[in-house]
Image (cartoon, rainbow, N blue to C red):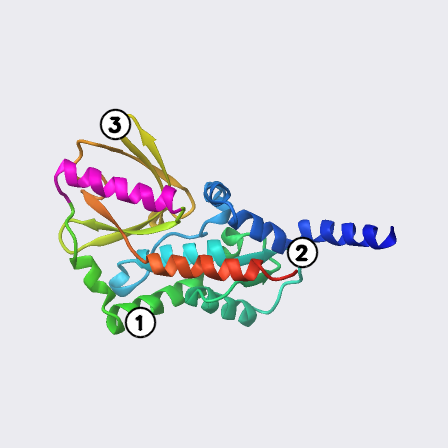
Amino acid sequence: MKIIIVALLSMSAYANSPKARFCMERSNFRSIQSTLTNPNNLMGFDNQGGIANGGVCWWHSRFQRNSHYLALFQPDQKKEEPRFYKRLIRLMVKGKKVVKIPGYKNLKEFSKTYRKYIQRQLNKWQLKDGFLKFAWVNGLQGRSSTTPEKLENMMDKLYQIVEGQKNLTYTKLQLQGIVAHAWLVYRMKKMPNGYEIFFIDSNWASQPKKYYYQYDDKTLDVYGGGLLYPEKGREFDKLKGIVTEYCSTAL
């Protein structure tokens, strides 16, 4: 009987642990979608900085996605020195492991506290990708408008990725000319004449947004018109794999 009681107590402790809550939230995509509607789980500052102060929207969005999957906040733990958290921020940029963050409740609180350092890392990330990996070329690719039939097909495919494959989807928003923005699409809902698209826009980082696409549209009526192109799919698969491996191990 004593062994059974000890085992039950151990199971109860695990169920209430930060790791258990972390794993439970990420095991169900509906739960992930729900957490993204809470501003406390989003970045605490908007897109800014970057080359010629033109913003770092692509990297801001990717940092948001990395953090949402890999950051395990431990508010009951003692806070550490700033250099400890700066190392964690660099790890979240790399997106290679679950990162435990003691002394903070959520991403909003943490990113507000370390706003300057996170911004510095996003600027560096942009420079690295932009000049070493030629990521800026992505802003030259793709159309900003198309036929209603083609756009409907694009939206159907995006719906399959988001809702069918259950992906928090990084999308390039190709605008007119050589300008490209980014959205994190976390939910889509079928409507009688189109889709509701639920997304995080780094220009309004702390507040989820919604857009209603209709089947006869030729472009999305945002920023003067644009189209969504899903990208960084393998990057997201890696995040899911990291979480799966982490949650498969004992407490």
Of the residues shown, which amino acid type is indicated by label 1? Lys
**In percent of the image, x 36 and y 45: which residue is there?**
162
Secondary structure beneath dot 2 equals loop
Of the residues shown, which amino acid type is indicated by label 3? Asn
Q: Which residues are magenta?
A: 145-165
Q: Position of residue 232 (x, y in %)?
A: 32, 58
Task: Tell me the residue that label 2 is attached to.
Answer: 76
Measured in 3D between alpha carbons, the distance from the residue under mark 1 to the one under mark 3, in whole angstroms, is 42 Å
Q: Quadrant of residue 236?
A: bottom left
In this view of the protein, which residue sits in the foreground, 14 or 81?
14
Q: Position of residue 53 (x, y in %)?
A: 28, 61
Task: Tell me the residue that label 3 is attached to.
Answer: 193
The earlier-in-sequence mark between 1 and 2 is 2
**In percent of the image, x 12 and y 39: which residue is there?**
147
Of the residues shown, which amino acid type is indicated by label 2? Asp
Question: What secondary structure characterizes most of the magenta part?
Answer: helix
The earlier-in-sequence mark between 2 and 3 is 2
Task: Please tell me whether residue 79 belongs to the stretch shown in magenta.
Answer: no
Most extreme residue toward the bottom is: 132
Q: Nearer the viewer, mark 1 or mark 3?
A: 3
Measured in 3D between alpha carbons, the distance from the residue under mark 2 to the one under mark 3, in whole angstroms, is 48 Å
Q: Which mark is residue 128?
A: 1
Q: Quadrant of residue 231?
A: bottom left
Secondary structure beneath dot 1 equals helix
